[in-house]
Image (tube, rainbow, N blue to C red):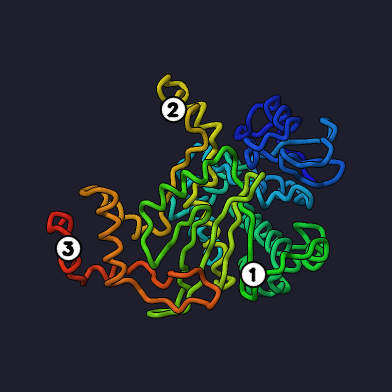
Amino acid sequence: MTTPPDHHPALPPRDVCLRAMAAKDYRFDGVFFIAVRSTGIYCRPVCPAPPPRRENITFHPNAASATAAGYRPCLRCRPELSPDAFAQVREDSVRRALVLIAEGALQDERVDALAARVGLSARQLQRVFVAQVGATPHAVHATRRLLLAKQLLTETALPVTDVALASGYNSIRRFNAAFREGCGMAPGAIRRQKSAEALPLGTLRLRLGYRPPLDFPLLLAFIAKRAIPGIEHVGADRYERAIPNPGTGAEGSAGWIRVRAIEGKPELSLEIGGVAPQAIPDVVRRVRRLFDLDADPRAIHDTLAQDPLLARALDLHPGLRVPCGWEGFELAVRAVLGQQISVAGATTFARRIVERWGTPLRMPADAPAGLDRAFPSPETLRDATLEDVGLPLSLIHI
């Protein structure tokens, strides 16, 4: 194991890290990780294990930094459950590269291609990543794959070959070697430590961590007012959506998701059914973005509370988040509709558009009732006669 600089500039002050570790403060979950020299393991600040001796620890700004220094993820606190904290990265090109990595950019392309997409040379990108993230782009990508595999092995009954595919490995041999190197044990050893929850065939359930507070009922209420029947459904305690499997075409096979809060824990439960293994990372990423799970409420509060009016509003409504859309084009259409008319009116027109031009889907037998459509593609709406669903000309010609 290598010893990193005393305290990485992306980290909170050392005394803040020590206090958060002692208090097991979930507000700092994912903001830093604790690497323990005596065990070779890195932990979340909320790890339930007894705190290590201070002289044996170093702090890392993210899991990739700790992994690059030679540490293995803790089996008890499970760093794969931590939300990301990359929003604190100052350099815009690095933030954009991190988004592209999360979308799978390094799965099929080299670092120099990623660097070109954000306007840097490969050498420049490597340098700014190490300076601001504490790890190279490839190390960030490899750690994301490793932690997803660890979560799937721990929480699901997916076959190891499917776990390898979901984690971006086309070779089971390479997957086994990478997992053994990163976790210090074979994939099967992780699975034997805890049996996965029994679920219907083709269904899995994952835990998604966030930094509290999060007002999940208020998020559901916001989405419910804008929900499009056929594509999504919002219940009193859940969000459900149809997920087209990539490459299946018109009336293609599809899966579904169901998102609920986990009582007593700063986590959401994500249930996935009928989704191809390779699509799991994208589904997880989109759900996290939809519910703004990687937000840092502590940093947001510290910034906005400088205004007295905003400070009072934050105290009255803790846990507010900024929900996002599932997909960019769908979000753009919703935004255009909502600019000109009321929320109810925009939702009515969106429903009509989906009823008329949405892609029919073949849903699994265990899918939630009422889900059978995907939002129409840009090509479909480009040639559509939108006046047929009552859209005003002022909206059509924006």
- What's the mark number on residue 390? 3
The correct choice, above or below, for 66 with respect to 327 in the image is above
In the foreground, 112 or 316: 316
User: What is the x, y in percent for residue 338?
Assistant: 27, 50
- Whichever of callouts 1 and 2 sits on the residue coming sooner in the sequence is 1
SS class, disc 2: helix
Q: Amino acid at mark 2?
A: Ala
Give the CA separation, mark 3 to mark 2: 39 Å
Q: Residue at x 37, y 64 (%)?
A: 229
The correct choice, above or below, for 367 with respect to 390 in the image is below
Closer to the eye: label 3 or 1: 3
- Give the number of callouts: 3
Q: Is residue 95 left or right of residue 355?
A: right
Q: Residue at x 81, y 58 (%)?
A: 184
- Whichever of callouts 3 and 1 sits on the residue coming sooner in the sequence is 1
User: What is the x, y in percent for residue 115?
Assistant: 48, 53
Q: Residue furthest front?
A: 236
- What's the mark number on residue 313? 2
User: What is the x, y in percent for residue 302?
Assistant: 52, 26
Residue identified by numbered label 1: 169
| Label pair 1/2, CB-CB below 8 angstroms | no
Q: Amino acid at mark 3?
A: Gly
SS class, disc 3: loop
In the foreground, 216 or 249: 216
SS class, disc 1: loop
The correct choice, above or below, for 123 with respect to 349 in the image is above
